[in-house]
Image (tube, helix red, strand yellow):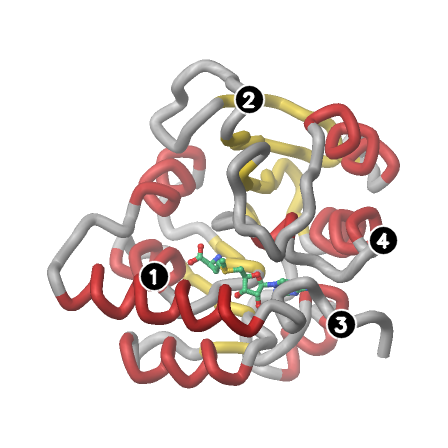
């Protein structure tokens, strides 16, 4: 295997994320913002991959909206939390780099997707220097006309995550065969800003 992800190296961040969302879900708080935007750009009954699905909130919200959702999460603690919180939502316990069409098909899921969500700072928690490889793998899993929804902090992100300047992200996406269709500042599509970036990407081959 390659280098560990920044997430795997960030034990305190994992605990904070885990307990934060346990509390929010228990209180009935709105944790569906990313899923609402993904739903808005997806066809009805879409094939959707949640890449780095964490404790499952985005994937579960998309499944509740009638989509065929595959949740993929490599952290065993979060896989366990996801299965406990959303027992109806299966989780593929794999790193994005291991999500081949064969691995997905052998688990009975679709092997290509209309929408891939990679939100909640996944891109800034990847293993060092794996960004282009991860974006390439996600592009390879897109169905024709499919799109990737990405979101991460530009500033004031978690201390254990990297800083990912927008220019560098766009260069990496381009190197991975992707183009930027949209950049916004929030999942409610506020204008682009210096704090948070939401991106819609598609394959340059479409
Ligand atoms: C802050 S959590 C967000 C989880 C979820 N997307 C959400 O928004 O609730 C960051 C996630 O990035 C995931 N991650 C980091 N590198 C990854 C990789 N190479 N493949 C899959 N997931 C990865 C971690 O396992 C973790 O679940």
The residue identified by callout 1 is: 57
- Give the label, 3 or 1, closer to the camera: 3
Q: Disc 1 or 2, which lies upstream in sequence?
A: 1
- Give the label, 1 or 2, closer to the camera: 2
Left or right: 19 in relation to 201 = left
Q: Disc 2 or 3, which lies upstream in sequence?
A: 3
Whether residue 25 appears in this view of the structure is yes
* 47 shown above or below 4: above
* 149 shown above or below 140: above
Q: Which residue: 64% across, 33% down?
A: 201
Distance CA(mark 2)–CA(mark 3): 28 Å
Rate crowding at label 4 as few (under 14), some (14 to 19) or many (20 or more) other CA atoms within 10 Å. Answer: few
Q: Which mark is residue 129?
A: 4
Q: Are marks 4 and 1 in contact (CB under 8 Å)?
A: no
Whether residue 117 appears in this view of the structure is no
Distance CA(mark 1)–CA(mark 2): 26 Å
- Give the label, 4 or 1, closer to the camera: 4
Q: Which residue: 48% across, 83% down?
A: 77
The residue identified by callout 2 is: 194
């Amino acid at each position: 295997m390659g280098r560990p992800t920044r997430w795997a190296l960030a034990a305190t961040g994992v605990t904070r994320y885990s307990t934060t969302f346990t509390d929010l879900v228990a209180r009935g708080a709105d944790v569906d913002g990313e899923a609402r935007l993904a739903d808005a750009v997806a066809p009805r009954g879409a094939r959707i991959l949640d890449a780095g699905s964490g404790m499952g909130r985005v994937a579960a919200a998309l499944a509740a909206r009638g989509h065929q959702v595959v949740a993929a999460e490599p952290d065993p603690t979060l896989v366990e939390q996801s299965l406990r919180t959303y027992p109806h939502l299966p989780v593929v316990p794999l790193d994005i780099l291991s999500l081949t069409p064969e691995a997905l098909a052998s688990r009975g899921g679709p092997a290509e997707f209309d929408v891939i969500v990679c939100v909640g700072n996944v891109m800034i928690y990847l293993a060092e220097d794996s960004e282009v490889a991860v974006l390439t793998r996600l592009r390879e899993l897109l169905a024709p006309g499919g799109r990737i929804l990405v979101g991460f902090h530009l500033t004031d992100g978690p201390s254990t995550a990297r800083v990912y300047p927008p220019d560098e992200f766009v260069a990496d996406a381009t190197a991975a065969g992707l183009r930027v269709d949209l950049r916004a500042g929030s999942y409610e599509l506020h204008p682009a800003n210096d704090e948070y970036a939401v991106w819609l990407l598609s394959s340059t081959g479409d």
